[in-house]
Image (cartoon, rainbow, N blue to C red):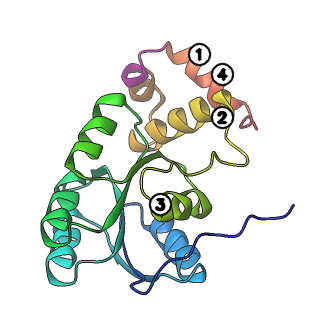
Amino acid sequence: MVEAALPEIGEDNSLLLVDDDEPFLRRLAKAMEKRGFAVETAGSVVAGKAISTARPPAYAVVDLRLGDGNGLDVVEVLRDKRPDARVVVLTGYGAIATAVAAVKIGATDYLSKPADATDITNALLAKGEELPPPPENPMSADRVRWEHIQRVYELCDRNVSETARRLNMHRRTLQRILAKRSPR
């Protein structure tokens, strides 16, 4: 497979990554450094706001839901300090209302998790009103559903009954889904 050339970053390659999922944050930071960004990470709204105030970056990738609040608060601070910053909001809970709120506050783009580094880079570096190209290998609807169920299951400390209640599904149905291998 031939990978398309990535757009140019520019002179200021500072990038702030804000996410409370530590393994994801580390993997994304490493991938973005390989793409030429000078990465700084934060695991909370408080840390993200502090970095945005002290050293506002040219680019930012901010998770919407963080352990200590809403990632849009970080986007607002960054917009105040550096209006030209390009900000991508990531979330595992894709909803039109939150996408609209993110864009109104000043986010450049809005991506659902799990997004890979190439999708994020394309979104960060898209010029003007141009939309980034669609992903090469988008997840199937079954895979997206499975990923969502797994995330809720983990957030409920692997409690099947609590997960089923929160997903509004029958416990036995959830058990059957969890027993299967992940779809492609």
* Whether label 1 touches label 4, CB < 8 Å: yes
Name the residue type under label 4. Arg
State the extent of the magenta-drawn residues as a range: 165-169
1 or 2: tag closer to the N-terminus = 2
Residue 104: percent from the left, percent from the top? 22, 43
> Which is more toward the observer, 85 or 119?
85
Drawn side of residue 30 relative to residue 45, left or right: right
Image quadrant holding the N terminus, namely: bottom right
Q: Does the magenta stretch include residue 128?
A: no
Cα separation between marks 1 and 4? 5 Å
Name the residue type under label 2. Arg
Kindly identify which residue carries mark 3: 127
94 shown above or below 175 = below
Cα separation between marks 4 and 3? 45 Å
Cα separation between marks 1 and 2? 17 Å
> Which is more toward the observer, 64 or 88?
88
Kindly identify which residue carries mark 2: 143
Q: Foreground mark, 4 or 2?
A: 2
Q: What element carries label 1?
A: helix
Q: Does the magenta stretch include residue 168?
A: yes
Q: What element carries label 4?
A: helix
Name which residue lies at 74% across and 36% down: 181
Kindly identify which residue carries mark 1: 173
